[in-house]
Image (cartoon, grey):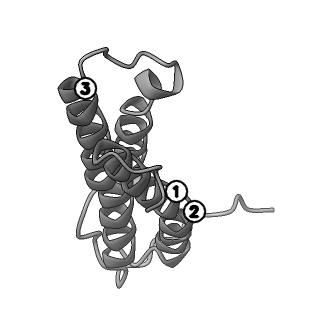
């Protein structure tokens, strides 16, 4: 009985990008970390600093939380990794929508609203 031989497909294209999973996870971590002071109630007493805190948190959630997940999904699709791209694309619908909601609520709170309008 012969040992199984590993076969390589010479026609398989090389990936365009490196593995994009760390990029998506890093962006998600930054977006979540920007909300930690708000979640723990560490709100400054100065109203101008409160506004700046909510605006900063909303931009970090929007750019990193949703942006890095979206970019990682596109990079997976470019690497011909449909499952990875769909998983990160689905992550956009889950974590991306949550970070967009967080960004909108934080922005509205910074402008003196009730968070939703």
What's the residue at 81%, 62% (across, down)?
1
Q: Which residue is mark 3?
A: 47
Instruction: Indicate the position of residue 8 as horizontal and vertical percent values.
Output: 45, 71
* Number of the label disc, if any, that sits on residue 98: 1
Q: Secondary structure at mark 2?
A: helix
- Res 110 visible: yes
Q: Marks 1 and 2: which is nearer the front?
A: 1
What's the residue at 43%, 52% (across, down)?
105
Q: Nearer the viewer, residue 1 or 90?
A: 90
Quick one: label 1, few (<14), some, or many (20+) residues within 10 Å? some
Q: Nearer the viewer, residue 117 or 78?
A: 117
Vertical arrangement, residue 84 with respect to residue 33, above or below: below
Marks 1 and 3 sit apart, C-alpha to C-alpha, by 26 Å
Q: Outermost residue toward the bottom?
A: 11
Vertical arrangement, residue 34 with respect to residue 1, above or below: above
Vertical arrangement, residue 85 with respect to residue 49, above or below: below
**Would residue 3 appear left or right of 28 to someone viewing this image?**
right
Q: Secondary structure at mark 3?
A: helix
**Would residue 10 appear left or right of 46 to someone viewing this image?**
right
Instruction: Indicate the position of residue 57 as horizontal and vertical percent values.
Output: 31, 39
Q: Marks 3 and 2: which is nearer the front?
A: 3
What's the residue at 40%, 78% (across, down)?
80
**Quick check: marks 1 and 2 in contact, CB under 8 Å?**
yes
Q: Which residue is mark 2?
A: 94
Q: Quadrant of residue 6?
A: bottom right
Quick one: label 3, few (<14), some, or many (20+) residues within 10 Å? few
Q: Nearer the viewer, residue 78 or 48?
A: 48
């Amino acid at each position: 009985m012969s040992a199984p031989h590993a076969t390589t497909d010479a026609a398989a294209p090389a990936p365009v990008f490196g593995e994009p999973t760390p990029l998506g996870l890093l962006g998600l971590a930054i977006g979540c970390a920007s909300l930690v002071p708000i979640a723990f109630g560490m709100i400054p007493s100065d109203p101008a600093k409160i506004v700046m805190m909510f605006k900063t948190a909303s931009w970090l959630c929007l750019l990193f939380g949703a942006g890095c997940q979206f970019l990682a999904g596109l990079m997976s699709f470019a690497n011909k990794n449909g499952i990875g791209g769909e998983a990160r694309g689905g992550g956009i619908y889950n974590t991306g929508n949550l970070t967009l909601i967080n960004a909108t609520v934080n922005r509205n709170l910074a402008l003196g609203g009730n968070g939703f309008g």
